[in-house]
Image (tube, grey):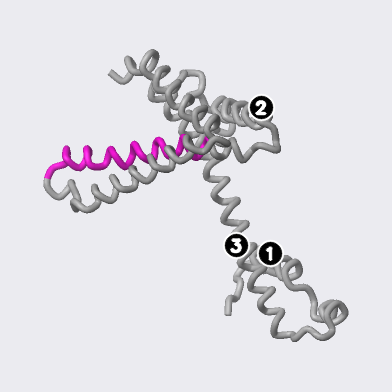
Amino acid sequence: MFLPESYQVTLFLMVLSMLCWGSWANTLKLCPRFRFQLFYWDYAIGLAAGAVAVSAFGVLNAQFLSGPRLTWAMARDGLFFTPFGRLNRRFLTPAPAILLLGVLATVLTLGLGLARTDLLTTGVVVVDAVFFALTGLALPILRRRGVGSDRGAAWIAWVAVIFAALELLAIAGSLLQQNVRLVALTGLGWVAAGIVIWALIFARRVK
């Protein structure tokens, strides 16, 4: 049995119980022949659904926080345009980076239309797959450069290569499907444009 130790947790569980289960009196009015024990299944399913919803919002929160911070860190290290490396004086938040990503997200969403956001998701998955594959291919190279115990087990490198191969197959599959081919090519075009901009503007700063 779970015993909440704070008022906030208790209140949250009470509200969740009201939404997922309801009172026994209302249950008898709506379903007079339904066994009481079966309502525990609804209660458990409601708790599980609520946990999934909270987890989903947590993932979205992490993505919303990491994107602007990553842009800010790149600008601070000279790998992106300098104005986006500034912080808000009062809240110490990367306001220019947040504004940039917000504008880009709005333009992309409205450009495709709210009814075609699935295509936008496909493009994001393709871009993610490119960098996931590069990460998997980079691991054997970094392992070879390591010394002694820092190199780790050999099977880790093979797992990374297999993972990269699967990601490349996912990219190839999106290119072979006619209904998402244009979106996949657009995502790859964004990656190519980023590489060109980095080579022309920011590569010198790394050196």
Q: Position of residue 177 (x, y in %)?
A: 51, 38
From this viewpoint, which residue is outermost toward the right? 29
Task: Read off the residue under disc 3.
Answer: 51
- Mark 3 lies on a secondary structure that is helix
- The quarter of the picture where the N terminus appears is bottom right
Q: Could you tell whether 95 is left or right of 135 in the image?
A: right
Q: What is the three-letter code of the residue carrying label 3?
A: Ala
Calculate the distance from the C-alpha at mark 1 to the C-alpha at mark 2: 39 Å
Task: Read off the residue under disc 2.
Answer: 111
Q: Position of residue 57 (x, y in %)?
A: 60, 51
Quadrant of the image occupied by residue 198: top left
Of residue 29 and residue 125, the one placed in the foreground of this image is 125
Q: Principal SS element in the magenta part?
A: helix
Q: Could you tell whether 73 is left or right of 186 in the image?
A: left
Q: Residues within 10 Å of mark 1 (few under 14, many from 20)?
A: few
Q: Position of residue 123 (x, y in %)?
A: 53, 35
Q: Residues within 10 Å of mark 2 (few under 14, many from 20)?
A: few
- Mark 2 lies on a secondary structure that is helix
Q: What is the three-letter code of the residue carrying label 1?
A: Phe
Residue sitting at x 47%, y 35% = 175
**13 falls in the magenta region:** no
Of the numbered discs 3 and 1, the one sitting upstream in the chain is 1
Residue sitting at x 49%, y 28% = 185
Of residue 111 and residue 83, the one placed in the foreground of this image is 111
Quadrant of the image occupied by residue 139: top left
Residue sitting at x 43%, y 30% = 73
Task: Read off the residue under disc 1.
Answer: 12
Q: What is the three-letter code of the residue carrying label 2?
A: Gly
**Residues shaded magenta:** 123-147
Calculate the distance from the C-alpha at mark 2 to the C-alpha at mark 3: 33 Å
**126 falls in the magenta region:** yes
Q: Please report contact status of discs 2 and 3: CB closer than 8 Å, yes or no.
A: no
